Structure formats: C-alpha cells, structure tokens
Image: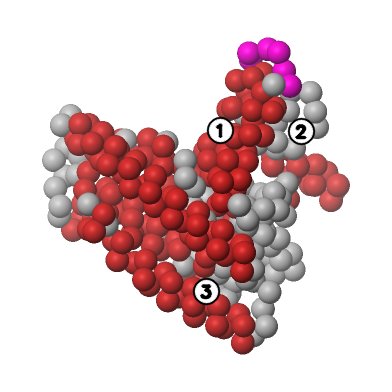
Amino acid sequence: MIENDPIFFAVPLFYIFIAIELYISYKENLDNFEQKDSWASIAMGFGSAFTGTVMKFVFLAIFYFLYQYRLFDIGWQWWAWLLLFFADDFSFYWHHRMSHQVRILWAAHINHHSSQKYNLTTALRQSWTELFYKYCFWLWLPLLGFHPIMIMIMTSFSLIYQFFLHTELVRKLPAPIEFIFNTPSHHRVHHAVNIQYLDRNHGGVLIIWDRLFGTFIAEDEKDAPVYGITNNINTFNPFKIATHEFTNIWTDVQKTSTWRNKLRYLVMPPGWSHNGPNRTSKYLQEQAKKKEA
C-alpha cells in the first residue's frame, strides 16, 4: 500500500521544491527559513509518516467493512472521481474546522501551526496523533458507495496539493482562482495569529466551503500574517512539539474539581477557561470589533 500511495511518489518532488524555495529565499535575502525550525518540521514529518501508515491500514479496514453496507454502487467512472473530489474536500473542511474548535482535537493538530516561519518545510510539520481520529470524518463516504481505495487515493492527492500552499513566495493568484481554490494567500491567513485571521480558511483544495460556512477571510496586504500559535512554545524538540498541548490540557483539567468542567476542557474551543480570562478566537475577535467601533 505504501509504495502505491501517491504521496510516496511526491516526496522527492517536495524536497526539490523546498530546495528551490530555499535558494530563492537566500538569493532574495528573505527571513522565512530557520535551520533548526526546518529540521524540526522534517522530523515531525517522518514521525507522522509512521503513525499515518499504521492508521491508514486501520481505517482502510474500517472503510472496507462499511463498504459492505453501501447505499449505491458508484464504481470507478470518471464522474465518480469528480463527485469524490468534492466529497473528500467537504470532509477535509469539517475535519480541519473541528480540529480548531475542539480542544482535544486541537491538541493533535496544533503542532502544524507551531512554527513561527512559513515555508514549504512547514507543510511537513504534520501531527503524530491526528491520524487517530482524522478519517472518522470520511466514514460516510464508503457507506455512500465510494470504494475505500478511491477514498485513500483522493486524500493523498489533496495533501499533495496542500503542500504547495505553504509558501510566501507566491503572492495572490488571478481572482477566479483565489475565489474557488485554496491558495498560498488564503493558507497564510490560516497559519496566522493575527486576531482577525484566527480560525479562518480551513479548506483543503477548495476555498468555497469557507465562503459558504462563514469562515473565510482574505489576506490583507496591510496586515501581514504573523505565524505561530497564540502562546508560542519556542522549542525545536519534536517530542515537545507533538505533545505540549496534551500536557497543557492535563494541567487545566487539574485546576477544577468538577467533572463537567474537566470534560469541557476537552471539548470546548482552545482558550476556554472555567475561571480565567476567555481566550477563544471568537471572543478575541468580538472584543477587537468592539474596540474598532
């Protein structure tokens, strides 16, 4: 299965483009690379490849089990791939959005946002734990009638596309492309900690879901994205990058004696507190709007 995964064939291409971006950044004297940060991202990528391979086998087995009870025999026709493209991207949008709005899921996803640099190596800073739940958002697809192998192939092509979004070298693309597709400009917003940019632009290949569900915001050239997380961890240790938010949750859970609040620290948005200042993105954005008014 590994040797047939499109990502397996794309890996050499990833490193070629990283080398090109690094060369251009050096020639243009840009401050978008940091050696230790990039190596940390690459190390995270290797760890994610291991857990990802294991969990793909697990979920592939689950998909095959569900496929027995499919509603339709969709098959492998060209139009099936077209339908699957939209269904896969729709699934990714909700997986990604929930990974920002449910704290225990955010604990798995946060490492991808932890770099304070933004370049193609950042795309490799993938989670070691996100794959344990990610494909739950795709369970409806084999039940609908999409073949499990088709689903896995489509998710891989989506990730390959998303790799190229992690760059500052590509500015805004022609308006029709920016309107329909996720672009480097849109994804820079997603990785930014500027208050108005928090929890925006969750799309994978398409940006239309963000436009439909109210999570889209365009990059403002007057307000350059600042990258990282709201409380930067300032470490290049892959194990700390992978686990620090789980540690933070455990610390917060111990602050309260009620089981209701303990559970809420797992399922409420990041920044929620039972007795402290509200630091959720929604609250911060509301406060920023009040100040502007």
Q: Amino acid at mark 3?
A: Leu
Residue 155 drawn at (x, y percent): 34, 52
Please state the extent of the stretch shown in magenta in the rendering: 255-260
Other-residue count near label 1 (Cα within 10 Å), few / some / many at <14 / 14–19 / ≥20: many
Q: CA distance from mark 3 to mark 2?
A: 37 Å
Residue 62 drawn at (x, y percent): 26, 33
Other-residue count near label 3 (Cα within 10 Å), few / some / many at <14 / 14–19 / ≥20: few
> Element at badge 2?
loop
Name the residue beneath numbered marker 3: 173
Please tell me whether residue 258 belongs to the stretch shown in magenta.
yes
Q: Are marks 1 and 3 in contact (CB under 8 Å)?
A: no
Residue 90 drawn at (x, y percent): 40, 46
Q: CA distance from mark 1 to mark 3?
A: 35 Å
Q: Amino acid at mark 2?
A: Asn
The residue at the far bottom in this view is: 27
Name the residue located 67 percent from the left edge and 53 percent from the top edge. 235
Name the front one of labels 1 and 3.
Answer: 1
> Element at badge 3?
loop
State which tag comes first along the sequence, 3 or 2. 3
> Is residue 184 visible to the viewer in this orientation of the structure?
no
Q: Amino acid at mark 1?
A: Ile
Name the residue located 56 percent from the left edge and 58 percent from the top edge. 40
Other-residue count near label 2 (Cα within 10 Å), few / some / many at <14 / 14–19 / ≥20: some
Name the residue beneath numbered marker 1: 104
Name the residue beneath numbered marker 2: 278
Name the residue located 49 percent from the left edge and 80 percent from the top edge. 20
